[in-house]
Amino acid sequence: MDVLSRPLIDRTLPLLAEGYAWLPNRMRDASGSVVRTRIMGRPALALRGPEAVRFFYDERNVHRHRAIPEPVLGTLFGHEAVHTLDGAAHRARKELFLPLLQPTSVAGLAEHVSDAWDAAVPEWGRRDSIVLFDEAATVLTRGVHRWAGVPLDDAGAGAAARDMTAMVDGFASAGPRHLRARRARGRQEERLARLVRDVRTGTVTAPAGSVLERVCAHKDADGEPLDEKTAAVELLNVLRPTTALAWFVAFAAHALHRWPENRTPLAAGDAAFRTAFAHEVRRFYPFVPFLGGLAARDLFWRGVWVPEGGLVVLDVYGQNHDETLWGDPYAFRPRRFLERAVGRDELIPQGGGDPATGHRCPGEGLTVGVLETLAAQLARMEYTVPDQNLAIPLHRVPTLPHSGVVLTDIGRAALQPSPRTAPVPPPHVEEVT
């Protein structure tokens, strides 16, 4: 039977069962960087590598419009979000976010988050223990709201943080997690739509130059301002991803516990090492498993075919652990980013391509800047990591250390080196330990 006409078995259920490991394992079985399969009833072409990134982000090949499943829009991104647009409409909407790439914006957000962290640490020290993931989410929520000019009282920060993390936690699931995510999005969209209405009617004044002011004033490619619901969606697309950095903060703490030799250069203020550490956390730990779009026409990639309208899937987790790119991908080694310049389309934890024109996350610079800052503050903190389950299940998307990283004796205990454990296994296994 001809390879192009060979029937494809739908692999949606194995994907849901295996999570991050599913696509890297299929790539390994295929002994290459491309796999032809079927997902959610559609023929799919899965690919990886810097050339594949450029192929994927070329709008002549792949479209994002109608590519994102409704369950993901209804929880993670929001309907009519920038992620769903292509061409001129996408470029016009993205103009709303591009100023966030500027160094002054990155520094401003990092400062607000740092201040919120400093304010929280004394209160953490009065408790027997904290779950770092939960507390980091609240700190990040407070900091990004202040930076974006979005009103939020301290009493409401915890509830808002829980909603933001619920949206991320439930996007790739079914059942209670997914329902929690939908309810959380509904609450936050309603809150922010009211705020947009109040700004536009003059009841509330948006701080000059703030994200809130930009969203309320933004006009799309058709010259019309965003409706209140879409404006709320795009505000959430600034607030929610920043709160989601709580995953990376928990991973940073996990790394410092397992490889404590990284603590000294972080705490000492080595700027280049801080950036390298942030990049390695984003590369090494599992967050985005893959990205998808729809084939704009009949496509061939390295001799493998997918028809127009089929799925094209970029293997993010697999590429970030590709031995041909990283040499020792399952070693946590920040200094790899000091040893050579890493290409734009090699490291893709938040997508690839040009953020100014394509679908790469425009907040990537904010992610790195904030993670650098909080990793350094974490390295300077005194705390104890008690016995707990720090394994990271690869079948769960998004994943996290089981315990959320519990800390005790904050500010009261001398730092103790943590013993090394075995190297992280490749993604055939169920957990990263």
Image (cartoon, grey):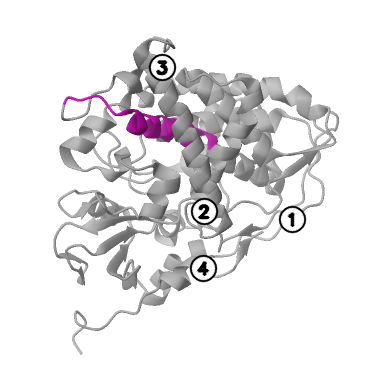
Question: In this figure, which residue is indicated by the disc labeled 1?
Answer: 389
Residue sitting at x 14%, y 65%: 298
Which mark, by number, is residue 18? 4
Name the residue beneath numbered marker 3: 198
User: Mark 2 or 1, which is nearer the eye?
Assistant: 2
Quadrant of the rendered structure where residue 84 is?
top left
Looking at the picture, does residue 53 appear above or below residue 266? below
Q: Is residue 41 left or right of residue 175?
A: left
Give the mark nearest the N terminus, 2 or 1: 2
Q: Are marks 2 and 1 in contact (CB under 8 Å)?
A: no
Q: Amino acid at mark 3?
A: Asp
Instruction: Pick whichever of labels 4 and 2 is earlier in the sequence.
Output: 4
The label number, if any, that marks residue 178 in the structure image: 2
Q: Is residue 432 left or right of residue 108?
A: right
Q: Secondary structure at mark 3?
A: helix
- Say which element carries label 1: loop
Please state the horizontal and vertical placement of residue 128, each as a whole percent of the image.
85, 36
What segment is highlighted magenta in the picture?
Answer: 223-243
Real-space Cα separation, disc 3 to disc 4, in angstroms = 45 Å
Q: Amino acid at mark 4?
A: Glu
**Residue type at numbered disc 1:** Asn
Labels 3 and 2: the sequence-earlier one: 2
Return the disc, 3 or 4, that comes first in the chain's sequence: 4
